[in-house]
Image: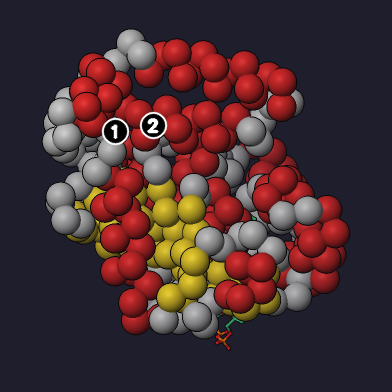
Amino acid sequence: DSLKYLKFERVGAGNDVALITLNRPQALNALCRELMVELSDLVLKIDSDSSFKVIVLTGSEKAFAAGADIKQMSELEFTDLLTGSYFQSWDTISKIRKPIIAAVNGFALGGGTELALMCDIVYAGEKAIFGQPEVTIGTIPGLGGTQRWPRFANKSVAMEVCLTGDKFNAVEAKTIGLVSKIFPVAELVQETIKLADRIAKNSPIIVQTVKKSVNLAYETTLAQGLQSEQHLFQQTFATNDRKEGMKSFAEKRQPNWTSS
Ligand code: HXC
């Protein structure tokens, strides 16, 4: 299929990592509706293709994504948002089963930061710049920012980020918990692919279960989350990969996963 706003490659040691690169350089990867539809369709296709185990999402060295397309948004009316399909494909990334890692170089502003927050892990390049500038253009974060910030950082940080629109760098992003590791700009994508490879070595069915269980922590109370974790833990005992994993340990050999 021909992609207009994205590049898509198969990478990784096991050739099972999907590398998606946002590719709208003239607008610093601003997220227009067409780009988001393309991204959503591609991510759903990869999620249901068992030859891929992990997704890496990146942009250019200058910009991960400079936010929703302000020129496109400025034409919209309240009723367009109510009746149109503007937001339909925007939260796909938060709903897929496979791990998706953001590799953020350059600007990740507004919807760009929120896109990173939707991913499971965020790695950043040294020159990454984050922020939720929506308040400075008369609106609020609309891709999850006001809800994910308080859950992933804390209230004071969430309020400061969303109320000021201030930009912040990779070190600050790591300090407040948005980013887990920082790398030199030119090494970021390769380092992120190495992380994807380490995840891809594990059983896909178990990896999917881990992701599901961790995500429950953001959706439920601790008591409900612990109970669900128990059920998911028990479920792993119904898989061949759980048997194979423990057997291979006892036999001092590498496991052969069948994802069954
Ligand atoms: C549309 C954008 C854009 C955006 C940049 N461009 N960001 N177009 N929407 N969000 C375009 C510029 O208009 C310009 O096009 C080209 O990209 C290069 O940008 P410059 O501004 O010339 O580059 P620079 O001076 O380096 O400044 C970079 C920047 C700045 C700091 C990232 O572009 C900026 O502040 N962008 C807007 C960031 C922002 O407010 N994002 C939040 C959007 S609201 P031309 O044609 O002039 O060359 C949002 C809501 C999410 O994200 C929720 C909705 C679902």
Crowding around mark 1 (Cα neighbors within 10 Å: few <14, some 14 to 19, many 20+) is many
Residue at x 29%, y 60% (from the top left corner): 194
| Residue 118 vs residue 253, the one in the foreground | 253
Q: Amino acid at mark 1?
A: Pro
What is the quadrant of the C terminus in the image? top left
Q: Decide if ligand 1 comes within 8 Å of the CB at mark 1.
A: no
Mark sitting on residue 208 = 2
| Residue 194 vs residue 219, the one in the foreground | 194
User: Is 199 positioned to the left or the right of 64 in the image?
Assistant: left
Q: Amino acid at mark 2?
A: Gln
Classify the position of ligand 1 by quadrant: top left, top right, bottom left or bottom right: bottom right
Q: Which residue is mark 1?
A: 204
Residue at x 61%, y 60% (from the top left corner): 178
199 over 115 or under it: above or below: above
Q: Return the x and y of residue 39 as percentages of the image width and height.
A: 39, 50
- In this rendering, does residue 36 appear at all? yes
| Residue 83 vs residue 177, the one in the foreground | 177
22 over 43 or under it: above or below: below
Q: Circles 1 and 2: CB distance less than 8 Å?
A: yes
